[in-house]
């Protein structure tokens, strides 16, 4: 079965700094989803990547999909305290099931 | 307007009891899901319904039974609750099987 490994597991940055979170799949990626979870809340859908080389941006968050490397990265530019939370990647290994990584906990210090 | 809602938000109960969690979506989606997030924050699929038909049924104890009375609702009934059932349960919905999923706020179940 497909497994997703996220790195780092946790990240503490100073406000204004850039950061990158990686998600590596054990199998071929058929779509990659990024979500954000704040403590005590549900997951918020950020973006979906479907094709190798695809890159999407929303405000200060950019996600890229490297299909050959079976990897996706999430980059936050000029981080703010509002970016704090747990970022999860999800993917399908050719089935209906969406499998999630264990998440990356991001703390942004003012 | 809440897109995917769950009730209750918190549920504290004793071992051996039977409880239900309700989920409703007003997005007009065809597919709904139940996920379990354990104490280590690991999120795992339990069930999925597409147009009221069960399409994903993971290795979950028989004590867990989902029911979809219509496309907008997916309930989760748990019999004979055990300590290990303590977790946060999330409902989600999507326009179809291979689309992005939208999650509810979660139900934190504590079994004592």
Image (cartoon, helix red, strand yellow):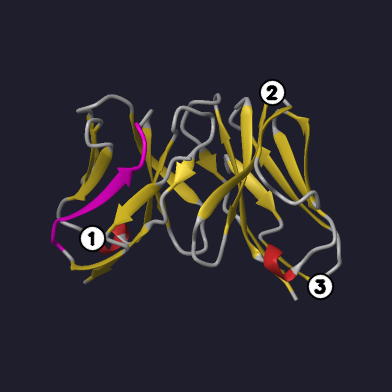
Q: Residue at 52%, 63% (x, y): give it.
A: A40
Q: Are marks 2 and 3 on the same chain?
A: yes
Q: As displayed, is residue A21 above or below residue B58?
A: below
What is the C-alpha distance between the residues marked 2 and 1?
41 Å
Residue B28 position within the rendered picture, expressed as x and y whole percent measured from the top left:
61, 26
Q: Please report, as a chain letter, where disc 3 is located.
A: B
Residue A91 position within the rendered picture, expressed as x and y whole percent measured from the top left:
41, 37
Kindly indicate whether the residue at mark 1 contacts the one at mark 3 (C-beta within 8 angstroms): no
Q: Nearer the viewer, residue A107 or B112?
A: B112
- The residue tagged 2 is B51
Q: Regarding mark 2 in the picture, which secondary structure is present there?
A: loop
Q: Residues within 10 Å of mark 1 (few under 14, many from 20)?
A: some
Q: Residues within 10 Å of mark 3 (few under 14, many from 20)?
A: few
Q: Please report, as a chain letter, where disc 1 is located.
A: A
**The image quarter in which residue B92 lies:** top right
**The image quarter in which residue A78 lies:** bottom left
- The residue tagged 1 is A80
Question: Is residue A25 left or right of B101 when viewed as pictured?
Answer: left
Question: Is residue A98 left or right of B80 when viewed as pictured?
Answer: left
Number of the front mark, 2 or 1: 2
- The residue tagged 3 is B14
Q: Residues within 10 Å of mark 2 (few under 14, many from 20)?
A: some
Q: Regarding mark 3 in the picture, which secondary structure is present there?
A: loop
Q: Residue at 69%, 67% (x, y): give it.
A: B84
* Magenta stretch bounds: A16-28
Residue B106 position within the rendered picture, expressed as x and y whole percent measured from the top left:
60, 55
């Amino acid at each position: 079965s497909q497994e997703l490994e996220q790195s780092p597991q946790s990240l503490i940055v100073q406000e204004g700094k850039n950061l990158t979170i990686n998600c590596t799949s054990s199998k071929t990626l058929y779509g990659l989803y990024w979500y954000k979870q704040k403590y005590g809340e549900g997951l918020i859908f950020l973006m979906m990547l479907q094709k190798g080389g695809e890159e999407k941006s929303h405000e200060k968050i950019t996600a890229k999909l490297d299909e050959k490397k079976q990897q996706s990265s999430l980059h936050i530019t000029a981080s703010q305290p509002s970016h704090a939370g747990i970022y999860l990647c999800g993917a399908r290994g050719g089935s209906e099931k969406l499998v999630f990584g264990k998440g990356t906990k991001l703390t942004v210090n003012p | 307007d809440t897109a995917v809602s769950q009730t209750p938000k918190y549920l504290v109960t004793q071992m051996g009891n039977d409880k239900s969690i309700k989920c409703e979506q007003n997005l007009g989606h065809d597919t709904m899901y139940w996920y379990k997030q354990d104490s280590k924050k690991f999120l795992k699929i339990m069930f999925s319904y597409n147009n009221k038909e069960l399409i994903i049924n993971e290795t979950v104890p028989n004590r867990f039974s989902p029911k979809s009375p219509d496309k907008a609702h997916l309930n989760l009934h748990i019999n004979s609750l055990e300590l290990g059932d303590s977790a946060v349960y999330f409902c989600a919905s999507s326009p179809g099987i291979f689309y992005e999923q939208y999650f509810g706020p979660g139900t934190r179940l504590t079994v004592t």
